[in-house]
Each structure stands twice: as structure tokens, then as C-alpha cells.
Amino acid sequence: MPAPDAMKADPVILALEGRVTAYLVGPIWAEALETLSRYADRPIVIDASRLESIDDTGIALLFDLKSRPRSVGAEVEIRGLAPSLAALIPDYAPDDVAEPARKWPPLGIIERAGRAASLQLAAAARMLAFLGDCAAALLQAFHRRGVIRWGEVLSVAAEAGANAVPIVLLIGFLMGVIIAFEIGLVAQQFGAVIFVVDGVGVAVLRELGALMTAIVFAGRTGAAFAAQIGTQKVNEEVNAILTFGLDPVRFLVLPRLIAAVLVMPLLTVLADVVGIFGGALVLAGFNIGFVQFYNHLLGAVGIEDFLVGVVKAAVFGLTIAAIGCQRGLATGAGATSVGLSATSAVVTSIIWIVVLDGFFTVLISS
Amino acid sequence: MERPAVSAQAQTTPAVSVRDLKVGYGSRVLLEGASFDVQRGEILVILGASGCGKSSLMKNMIGLYRPMAGDVLIGGESIVRAGPTEKARLQRGLGITYQSGALFGSLTVLENIRFPLDEFTDIGLEQKNLIARMLLHQVEMVEAQSRMPAELSGGMLKRAGIARAMALGAEILMLDEPSAGLDPITAANLDRTILALRDNLGLTFVVVTHELQSILKVADRAVMLDATSRSIIAEGVPSELRDHSQDARVRQFFNRRPDAPETEVRR
């Protein structure tokens, strides 16, 4: 431990004893620096004669103390250091291990806004180019047999569709229950509970069935697409496909797009059925029997309501898969990039789902 | 903060002792009856053909996997029988590098080196940065301190991994395939770094590799594993193993002859 002793001699003596290791060096270093700054005008002698051993942190301590700029006559001198330990202290200049100077000055708000805007424009251009590639691959698939790898499509469909059934059933059911209960409580005050059937039917079939399924699909499958393709990009599998003269869009993207367009409507139908069943279950508590619910529902909604939901689901599926795959292919290097791609895929998908839903609503209403 | 036991042990205790170790996964045995010591300040190389269980042996030695039987002593203390707290203490006394470097992708190179110091010491930030930069200087990586791991080459990742493994002043460094996939110059630099660290700091090295040039250059002693017999088939000074081993498999390995050693291979 350092023991500043300024009383006995003109130079200030700092004694280092025993072992100086990573686990012990913190307070020693702090005390030594404090001594150096307190006696800025006096020479400092570090008495290392009783120092037994040091590790890399002890070496750094001695290097730091020795290299600190001091005024003339107030230098730091290390005395009594065993030759085997002295040999460990590097003789390079402190600048060799100095903090690097910042290369670029920090950007102002206008530059940052400009940079963000240009990045967004570039991302939009990349997305458009990617959609163009997808369209070209799909067109090729219609004209030539063997372009679509159906085995891969089935495998993706099973993972994205069949394995998602339990969670879609749960979310769909709870959604129907919640809507029926919330509207039912209000409608009860006006003696209009029967019209809750209309509300549940229209809301689930036209909007919520597709919307909630799409959100689950984005979180579950969109993220998985981005992470899978992103990992393949990081592992250079995408490069291997390219250097075989093959198109990554056809190999990696097309099966996922087709699988998503196929399974999203099916999952939405399931969500519709259990959602309406959940609503019927709740309304049974409001004295609306299952038969009465069924008969009223037939009058309240038509096939077009069901079809609107299913078509939306297919478009949502296409959107989520395209965004997931594009984010995967745009992954940079390293594990962090894969995580960022997956997150970005989910966030972007959900934003686009809501935007497209609004677009559908306006289009259909007008 | 408590100092790991490895450095508190008497200097006569071997740094690492492997005792009748049986290594494998599930019912598949890769290696059995493995016993050897690593002395302090020694560079021991574990070598053998691909798939013979070199990396698995190392993972058992550092307590990542539990061996099927046998024991591993770090500075005289069993890492196999140690409880979670004791095991963590023993592991902190080891500097370990992995095949890929295993740097944390979300941290810069400097932050990666500083990470163990941030977690386990109360050294000031400026001082930790100095220690990290000096370690990076030692592995000739100081220029790359602000870069992210994704921006580094394979050799740079491995060298940064070694710097991180040394940050807490570990006296035993375990390196898994440090020079695999590196160009000859970078691999030679890495060998030079290992020798310098052993000579200057008295560190102990256990190096898993099958790079012949590296083995012959750095190893004081080598332990050779064999996939077929699932055992250690040779132990000794690498150059003597190469020149004087009675075991045909050892001579095949050192002389890069895939066929029987009696048969001359035309190249």
C-alpha cells in the first residue's frame, strides 16, 4: 500500500508492497494519484523494494505513475524494483497508448436530420429494389417450373402456420371475449345487447381477426425470417448462394413469401372463428343464446366481410414476409446486427400493417 | 475483491492437473483415462486431429462442461467438484479465449477488454482504459480500440480475445485454436506474443491447436489425443515426439503423412 511520507525527506516516498493485482490495485492507484497531485511540486520516489509481484494492472500502474507529466524537479522515480519486474514496464511513449483523438466533430441538428432523411430515403430505395426483385422472381416462377422450392415452402408454412395455431387461437378467443364484454356492458344500459352481435361479427371478421393475427405473425414469423436470413448472411451462406450464380431472392425469399401468403389467411379464419365463439360465450352471460347469436350474426355480416378480412390477411402476410426477408438480407456483420434486423422487421411490419389497414378501410368505405 | 485461488497456491503445485478424465457427450465418449499436469510458467499444447476432442477436453478443464468421470485441479482445487461460487472464483483466475474470439458484439474492442475490469475491480475509468490500451498494445491491436468486433478480421478477433483474457491478471491462459485460420505472419505474431507473455509475466499456457509450426515453436510440452483409441497417445517435447516417437500415429501427425508412415507418399 502506498504510504506517503513527506516528513522524513524532501522527496515524497510512496511505498508499494506485496502483490499488486487487478483485485487490489484500484485503491492503491487512486491513493498514488492523489499523492502525486497533492505534492505536484515535489519529487516522488516510489519505493518498490518490497514489491513481490505484479500483473498487467500493476504494470499499468507503474507505467502511468512514471509517465505522468510533472514539472522539472518534481519527477517520479521508481526505486528498488526487482530487475525481473522492471523488465515488465514497457518503454514506449505514453502517446502510444493514449486515447485516440475524435476524427470527426459531432454533427449539428441540421446535419443529423439530413443524414437521417438520406438514410431513410436510401432504405426506401433498397426496399423498392427488393420488391422489384421479388416481383421478378414471382413472375419467373409463373413461367418456369422448378423455380419455387415447394419443399421449403411447406417447411416454412408448417413452422409459420401450424406451429402458430395455439397462440392465434388464444389471442383470437380472448379478443372476441374482450370486445363482447366491453360493448355488452355499454349496450346493456340501452337494452341493445343483441346489437353486440353485429359489433363482434363486423369487428372480428373485417378488422381484428386479420389485424391481431398479423401482429402475432409479425412478432413470431417476421422476426424469425429476419433472424434466419440475417444469420445466413453473417455466416456467408448468402455469399455462397451468390457465388453459385443463384439468386438469394429465389432461394431464401420466395418460399417464405409464398408460405406467408398461404398461411396468414388460414390463421385469420381460425382467429375469426374462435373470436366469434368467444363473443358468443360472453353474450350467453347477457342472455343471448347461441342459436339467437347465430341467427342474428347471419343477418349482420355477409360473405364480403369475411372476404375483406381474408384478403387483408394475405396482403399483411406478404408485407410481413417481405419486410422480414429484406431486413434479413440487409443485415450487417455480427450477432448484434442480426438482433437489430429482427427488431427492425417487427417494428416496420407492425407500422405497415396499421398503414395498410387504414388504406383498406378508406378504400372499402369509399 | 477476493483474489482467485490459483495465485494463492504454493508455487510447487501444478497450475493445472487433469486426473483420469473421461470426456464425452451423452453416451458418446471422446476421451477417457486422460491424466497430465501443467506446470507453472509452462506452455502445454493439446494436439490431435480434427474431431479427437481437443476443444471438448479444454471445455471440461475450464469447468464449462462436467466430465463423465475424473477430476481437474486448478492450482490444487477441483473445478469439477466445486460449488457454483467456488467454480466462478476458479474460472475468474483463468484467462480463456475461444475459437472465434468471442468478443461481445455490442461493445467496442476497448470496452471488451475493459469488461472484466468493470465487473470485478474498483479501478477508475481512466486507469481501466489505460490498462486496456496497454493490453491491446501488447497484442498489437491498439489502433483498433474504437472498432466494433464485426469490423475485425479473424486474427484481430483472436488477439483481442487474448488481451481480454489477460485483463484480470490471470496466471493461466487457456487458448482454443488461437492460430487456426490465420495467415502465417499473423500466426507467427501470435506465437511470439504467447512466448513473450510467458517469458515476461511467467504466465502458464494451455493451447489447443493442430497447427504444426505453432506447436513446434511455442510448446514446452505436448499432449496428443487420438480419436480412434479415445486416449492420450503421446506426451512430451514436440520436437522429440516428431523425431523419436515409437507410435506411428504420432509420426504421421508430425510428418503430415495421412497414409501408413512406412509408405512413402508421393506429392
Image (cartoon, grey):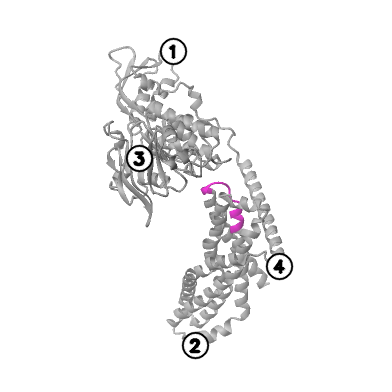
Q: Residue at x 51, y 34 (%)?
A: B187
The image quarter containing residue A299 is bottom right
Give how far apart the Cα atoms at labels 2 and 1 are: 100 Å
Amino acid carrying label 2: it is Val
Give how far apart the Cα atoms at labels 4 and 3 are: 60 Å
Residue bounds of the magenta highlight: A324-336
Q: Which residue is mark 1?
A: A72
- For the C terminus of chain A, the quadrant is bottom right
Label 1: chain letter: A
Secondary structure of residue under mark 4: helix
Which residue occupies the extreme left position in the image? B10
**Marks 4 and 2 share the same chain:** yes
Q: Which residue is mark 2?
A: A291
**Marks 1 and 4 share the same chain:** yes
Q: Residue at x 50, y 68 (%)?
A: A164
Q: Residue at x 69, y 65 (%)?
A: A141
